[in-house]
Amino acid sequence: MRYLVPALVCALLGLGAGSAYGSQSAPPLGEVHGRIAELQSLVAADNRAHPTAAVASAEEALGLLATAPDPKAEAWFLLALTRDLIALDELPKATDVLERGRRLVARTNDERTRLLLEIEAGALLNKMQKYTESRAVLAAALPLAESFHQANPGDYELALDLGRGYRLLGHSLNASGNFLEAIKAYQRAQAIARDQGDRRGQAQVLNKMGDLYTNLGQFAEARSAHLQAIDMAETIADVVLQARCHISLSDTYGSQHESDLQLKELDRASALAVKAGETYLQLVITINLADVHLLRNNDAQCHQPCGPLNTINPDTILSIDLIDLTN
């Protein structure tokens, strides 16, 4: 029995210590909200080129929000996390986060975030090459987002996402051969980017229009669009976008069997990817370079281009006005 008193004292001390420790492990609510605000600033400031750090910050914030609920902040982080996971090609995880966000905004009637999440759903389906499903989601969300934008013209983030939604719609239409509708979507994206002074968005639309021209077999127009996109990306010092535009231009040259020019563009893209520290992009370029060299060897054995050209019915070839870069 002589051990019971010390044991009881230790137990009581342990309870006291545990209580004190527990208060230390659960910081005051003000500190939690302060950290969440700090994480939101970090995520918002990310350049989105390779948002691994932004993903980690968003996940930390969502963990903190489990102890300090704030539906509006949670919706913001779920939207950002969905977008960044799509950019990183973590598509199953992006799907889970997207559905979590959809459930939250359905409970809170947050229409703005709901529309932005639907644009991300379109982006996710595009990445999965589910173009029909992507078109359906975007076709339903974009008119509503347009109305929301007209009622809130000062909402810059909404405007940027609306323009992105039209670029995504244009891509899905282009990929499935609906060129006329793709033109309309790109023209709307062009107008939004111009109105918002979004030079990065303008460059992205130009590059997408170059892809469309290539699919139409209008190679001179495609080259012009890609070169304008490269110039625009250079003016805003977006090295990753420059690299992607050079890759797109190389694809246009590839469709014309201009392998020397194709290789030059891939070399330029590679140098830019190295400068940006984009390992994944470097890998994509290396694979493309290997494909070009393989095709050149095959062509040499055939004594002529062996692969089929991108042939389009001449009746479908249209003239598309490029973005006026002076605006």
Image (tube, helix red, strand yellow):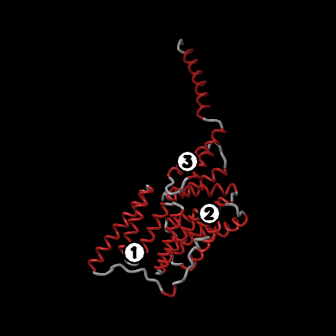
Residue at x 30%, y 77% (from the top left corner):
299
Quarter residue 246 falls in:
bottom left
Residue that badge 1 annotates: 254
Q: Point out the frontmost of discs 1 and 3.
A: 1
Query: Quarter holding the N terminus?
Result: top right
Residue at x 37%, y 77% (from the top left corner):
257
Tag 2: residue type?
Leu
Quarter residue 288 falls in:
bottom left
Residue at x 65%, y 68% (from the top left corner):
195
**From what the image shows, is residue 55 above or below residue 202?**
above
Asked if residue 105 can be seen in this view, the reply is: yes
Residue 313's label in the rendered image is none
**Mark 1 surroundings within 10 Å by alpha-carbon count, few (fewer than 14), some (14 through 19), many (20 or more):** some
Query: Quarter holding the C terminus?
Result: bottom right
Mark 2 lies on a secondary structure that is helix
Mark 1 lies on a secondary structure that is helix
Asked if residue 65 can be seen in this view, the reply is: no
Tag 1: residue type?
Gly
Residue at x 54%, y 79% (from the top left corner):
179
Q: CA distance from mark 1 to mark 3?
A: 40 Å
**Mark 3 surroundings within 10 Å by alpha-carbon count, few (fewer than 14), some (14 through 19), many (20 or more):** many
Tag 3: residue type?
Ser
| Residue 291 picture location, percent across and down | 35, 69
Q: CA distance from mark 1 to mark 2?
A: 32 Å
Residue that badge 2 annotates: 160
Which is nearer the N-term, disc 1 or disc 3? 3
| Residue 160 picture location, percent across and down | 62, 63
Residue that badge 3 annotates: 57
Asked if the residues shown at circle 1 and circle 2 are in contact, with their CB atoms under 8 angstroms apart, the answer is: no
| Residue 305 picture location, percent across and down | 33, 80
Q: Of all residues shown, which one is farthest toward the right? A: 151
